[in-house]
Image: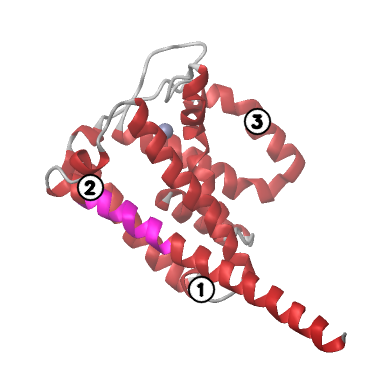
Amino acid sequence: MAWSYIFCKSTGRSLNINVPMYLALLIGTIPDFDIYFFFAGSYHGAYTHSILTWSPIFITLLFIFRKIAIPYLIGISVHFLGDFLTNEIPFLLPIIGTDFGLLLGNNAYYAALLEIGALVVATFIAYSNGDLRSSMQVLPKNMLSFIPLIVLVSLTLLFASEFNINLIQHGFQGLSISLISISHIILALFLTLSAFCGLYAMISTKFLIKNRKGLIA
Ligand SMILES: [Zn+2]
């Protein structure tokens, strides 16, 4: 999510396109939505991680939305790059079924460095473009932070339950994995705070409208 935010926002900025924070975070997780289909026998990291599968979608989106689509397509592409660096993905499916990747994720220190590095850079960008401040304000639009939050939590829980991973035991095994888990927790907490700011704004706005109606009646 953090890498997607960095690249989506940076591309958006250079193209003069405002990408909302929740979308910049969310867009990079879309290839992992195959996790939601485990119940239907879907494999994680197969067709949703193939550039060939995505090409017609990318071309259609570029054709319809032109320049506006670019930051979002970059956000999705960054997911492939991240998985290529840390893992292996079959990005030429269905033509070639071979997995390609550098498997840097096998080295917990590289994985932690990539994860923490992304969070630090994303925080810096969010601070400089005002996203950090506005996401902590009592504004109804911050309700949208619930979307990446729900996606982050649900994907983690579904993945863990499919592969029988005990998150508490596995997530804090050694310094590097603990750092990765902590960076996920920080992101989840940040999104929770932002979402509750939005929820509070919505509730107080409705309360104000109700009170005003009461006064008029
Ligand atoms: Zn992936």
The disc at residue 71 is: none
- List the single residue furthest toward the right: 217
Choose the circle earlier in sequence order: 2 or 3: 3
Q: Could you tell me which residue is drawn at 38 percent across and 61 percent down?
A: 189
Point out the tag, 1 or 3, that comes first from the N-terminus: 3
Magenta stretch containing residue 183, yes or no? yes
Q: Is residue 75 visible?
A: no
- Does 66 lie within the magenta span? no
Q: Are marks 1 and 2 in contact (CB under 8 Å)?
A: no
Q: Magenta region: which residues?
A: 179-190
The quadrant the C terminus occupies is bottom right
- Answer few, some or many: residues within 10 Å of disc 1's Cα (few below 14, many 20 plus, some between 14 and 19): few
Residue at figure coordinates x 30%, y 49% from the top left: 115
Residue 57 is tagged as 3
Residue at the image position 74 percent from the left and 83 percent from the top: 211
> CA gap, disc 1 to disc 3?
31 Å
What is the secondary structure assignment of the residue under circle 3? helix
Of residues 66 and 44, the one drawn nearer to the viewer in this rendering: 44
Is most of the magenta stretch helix, strand or loop?
helix
Colour theme? secondary structure
Badge 1 marks a residue whose secondary structure is: loop
* Image height of 36 relative to 17, above or below: above
Question: Does residue 183 sit above or below 137 in this rendering?
Answer: above
Which residue is labeled 1 in the image? 130
Foreground: 151 or 196? 196
Q: Which residue in the structure is indicated by mark 2? A: 112
- Identified by mark 1, the residue type is Gly
Q: Is residue 21 left or right of residue 167?
A: right
For the residue carrying disc 3, how many other residues have a C-alpha within 10 Å: few (<14), some (14-19), or many (20+)? few
Mark 2 to mark 3 CA distance (whole Å): 32 Å
